[in-house]
Amino acid sequence: MKIPFNRPWIEQTELDALSAVIKEGRIGGNGPVCHEVERMLGEMVRVGHALLMTSCTHSLETAIRVLGLSTGDQVIIPSFAFPSAANAVLLCGAETVMADIRRDTLNIDPEDIERKITRRTRAVIPVHYAGISCDMGRIMDLAAAHGLKVVEDAAQCIGSAYRDQPLGSIGDIGCMSFHETKNVVCGEGGAFFTSDEELFHRAEIFREKGTNRSRFLAGDIDKYSWIDLGSSFVLSDILAALLRTQLGKLEAITGQRARIHRRYDEGLKGLADSGKIRLGQIPQDYRANYHIYYFLVEGGGRDTCLARLQEAGIRATTHFYPLHLSEMGKRMGSREGDLPVTEEVFRKLIRLPIYPGLEDSQVDYVIDVLQGILN
Ligand SMILES: Cc1ncc(COP(=O)(O)O)c(C=O)c1O
C-alpha cells in the first residue's frame, strides 16, 4: 500500500469553475470573483474586511508593514513556526524575539510571552498550530496590558475557532493560507483579515503596488495613482474561482478530516495509554478543523519510526525545524537549549497522512504498522 502524506480534494467542479472563469476572460487579480470570495471569507471568519493575497506569507508581510513596525521594534513569535512570520518582521527592519511553546497544544506559551516583553515590544504573532487555537484570552489580555498589536498566523485555520470566535478574527490582523497543503486550497494563496478600517485601507493600497486601484475598481475615483509604498499581492481571479469552489466544500472537507482524526485517536489510544506516544489535545471548548494529525514519540526512536513507516509505504513526516536552531536563527544569536519545549517537540513529533479520500482501511493500515513498530 502507498499512502501519500497529503492530497488536495480536486474534483470536476473545480475544473469547471476554472474553465468558466478563463472562458469569461477574468484572469487578472482583484476582480469580481476575488470580491465575491472576499465577501464569503469575511462572513465565515466574521471580520469587517477580508482581502485575498497571493499567500499567507504575503499577508503576514502586509500585516507588519501596515502596522508600521520598523527598526528598534520587537515582535514576539514562537520558534516552532514556519519562517514566514519571522521574515515579515525582519523585512521591515524590526527584531524577532522567540518564545517557547506549551506542551499540550504546541502553541506559543503566554507565560513565556510575558517574560519576553520589553519596552521595545510592539506586537506578538501567535501561530495557531494544527488549526488549534493559541490561548487567545490570555494573549489578548497581555496585549491590552502592554499596548501590543496582535497578528494571528492563522495559516492552517480555516473553519477553526477559539471558543466561538473564528481564528483570524481575534487579533488586530489575521493571516490565512490556501496553499495546496491546507484544508481548503487554491494552489498558492492567502487572506488578510481585519476589522480596523485604517489597517484595511493601508493593506488594500500595499497589495496593489502602493496605488488606490481598489477605490477605482469600487467606482469611488475615476483614476488611480501611486500614493504609498507597496507591492503586488493580489490574487488572480482564476485562483479565486478555485478557492470559491473549495470553500463551498469546507464542511465536507472538515467532516472527512474529523473522521480520520477520530479513527487515529481511537486506534492509537493503546500506545498512548502505555506511554509510548503522546497524542495531541484539542481543548474542550475550541473548534478544531483537523488540519494536522500528530503525535510525539516518547523515549526516543522517532527517526527509526519514520523510516519504518516510509518502508511500509506511508508518507509520515516531522514538522517545523525550530526557527531558533535554524541557520538563520543561529546567525541571529540563538543557541540550543534556549527553548526546551520547542526542541523536545521537534525531536519527537510525527505527522500522519490526513486528507479527504483517505479511507478507513488505509487509516487502519497506518495504525497497524505503528503498533508493529512501537510495541
Ligand atoms: C503556520 C504557517 N504560517 C505561514 C505559512 C505560509 O503560508 P503560504 O504558503 O500561504 O505563504 C504556513 C504554510 O505552511 C504555515 O503553516
Image: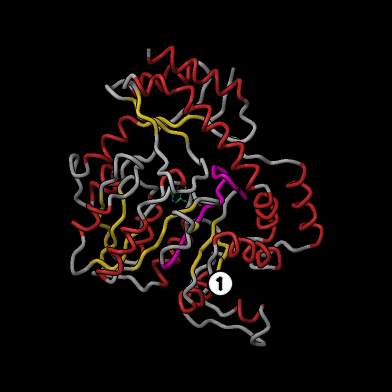
Q: Nearer the viewer, residue 144 or 294?
A: 144
Give the prevailing secondary structure in the magenta stretch. loop
Q: Secondary structure at mark 1?
A: loop
- Quadrant that contains the N terminus: top right
Mark 1 highlights which residue?
A: 208
Q: Position of residue 133 (x, y in %)?
A: 41, 50
- Please name the residue shown 60% across and 47% down the image: 184
Q: Measured along the vertical axis of the image, is residue 12 above or below residue 46?
A: above
Quarter of the image holding residue 229?
Answer: bottom left
| Residue occupying the far bottom of the picture | 222
Q: Position of residue 110 (x, y in %)?
A: 27, 54
* Residue range of the region highlighted in magenta in the rendering: 172-186
- Please name the residue shown 29% across and 45% down the image: 101
Q: Residues within 10 Å of mark 1 (few under 14, many from 20)?
A: many
- Please name the residue shown 31% across and 42% down the image: 322
Position of 75 with respect to 50 (left or right) is: left
The amino acid beneath tag 1 is: Glu
Distance from mark 1 CB to nearest ligand 1 atom below 8 Å? no
179 magenta-colored: yes
Q: Measured along the vertical axis of the image, is residue 148 above or below residue 223?
A: above
- Please name the residue shown 40% across and 44% down the image: 283
Q: Position of residue 225 (x, y in %)?
A: 57, 83
Q: Position of residue 194 (x, y in %)?
A: 49, 68
